[in-house]
Image: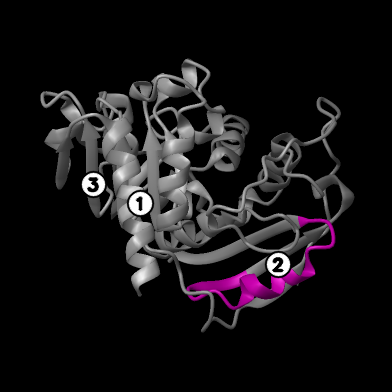
Amino acid sequence: MAEILVVAEHDNAKLDKATLHGVTAAAALGTVTLLVAGEGAAAVAEAAAKVAGVAKVVHVDDAAYAEPVAENLASLVVAMADGYDGFVVGASTFGKNLMPRVAALLDLAQISDIVEVVGPKSFKRYIYAGNALATVETRDAKLALTVRTTAFPAAATEGGSASVETVQAVAPSDLVKFLGREVSASERPELTSARVVVSGGRGMGSGENFVIVEALADQLGAAVGASRAAVDAGYVPNDYQVGQTGKIVAPELYVAVGISGAIQHLAGMKDSKVIVAINKDEEAPIFQVADYGLVGDLFTIVPQLTEALKASKAAS
């Protein structure tokens, strides 16, 4: 059976959910080892050992991995490469930064954003902005994969009993230096893991008008997203962006407000369980994928919907 190394994404305190989806995909390929590289991340290694489907945890504790610097982590993975038949990571910003470096150093053809494991070396992934599903196969000796997290269920965080092995760090790269991190703080759920997402588009007209979207999101306990057009217009920061070049989401409920539904945006949210679209243009492409559509002025409809939710909560 193939030996697969999944690189854990974490903050030295807890595992990121993207890793759990990666474990599920890797388990379809063979025996899973989870690499936890960090500084003071013993709690993460212990939690990783309990993840269902993980056979072994490799824990590397060193100041070089205090921050997820891709060059340092890639060197570590390459140093461990001889013992594994494949390398897997979630297709998050972390994974998209790391895996191309691993693939290049090992001279492998990376297969990105897989949505299904077809066979030992064949996979399905979307192409043409999500309009076609391609089956691709590699002839490389080893696999280098990123996994679309919305396509695979998260592995259970309890039930596993993996052994934990401590491994020495490798020399960090002298090409990069970590200077700092700017983290946007929010009391709302994280966009890629939220159960409900409310997104605004160019139709919002301005960044100030996004308070309408935020008010609705607060009533639904939702994360706030945006289309690329809204981000490019400067209405909201780019970490709000949902779409092919933004974040891929698949919540139970996705509410698209003032979003026309360009192909790039649909590629990032069309797997949502229920899609509600609010747009004044009844010919907008978003209605082709929506389960429910409201045609009208969003500046009237959205506040009315927010007030109705408030009233419903008060009545209950």
Label 3: state its secondary structure.
strand
* Residue 296, image quadrant: top left
Magenta residues, start to end: 38-56
Q: Closer to the camera, 123 or 264?
A: 264
Q: Residue 140's x, y, as percent? A: 43, 39
Answer left or right for 294 relative to 48.
left
Q: Residue furthest top?
A: 233
Q: Quadrant of the N terminus?
A: bottom left
Report if the CB atoms under discs 1 and 2 are less than 8 Å apart: no
User: Can you tell which of label 3 and label 1 is closer to the viewer?
Assistant: 1
Tell which of 260 and 121 is nearer to you.
260
Query: CA separation, marks 1 and 2?
Result: 42 Å
Residue at 63% across, 62% down: 15
Query: Residue at image x 67%, y 55%?
Result: 10
The question of residue 146 being in magenta is answered with no
Q: Position of residue 74 (x, y in %)?
A: 68, 40
Label placed on residue 187: none
The residue labelled by disc 1 is 307
Residue 50 lies within the magenta run: yes
* Secondary element at image label 2: helix
- Neighbour class for label 3 at 10 Å: few (<14), some, many (≥20)? many
Cα–Cα span, label 3 and label 2: 35 Å
Which mark lies nearer to you, 3 or 2? 3
Label 2 sits on residue: 44
Please indicate whether residue 51 sits to the left or right of residue 277 in the image: right
Q: Is residue 122 visible?
A: no
Residue 181 in view of the camera: yes
Local crowd size for mark 1, using a 10 Å CA cut-off: few (<14), some (14–19), many (≥20) = some
Q: CA distance from mark 3 to mark 1?
A: 20 Å
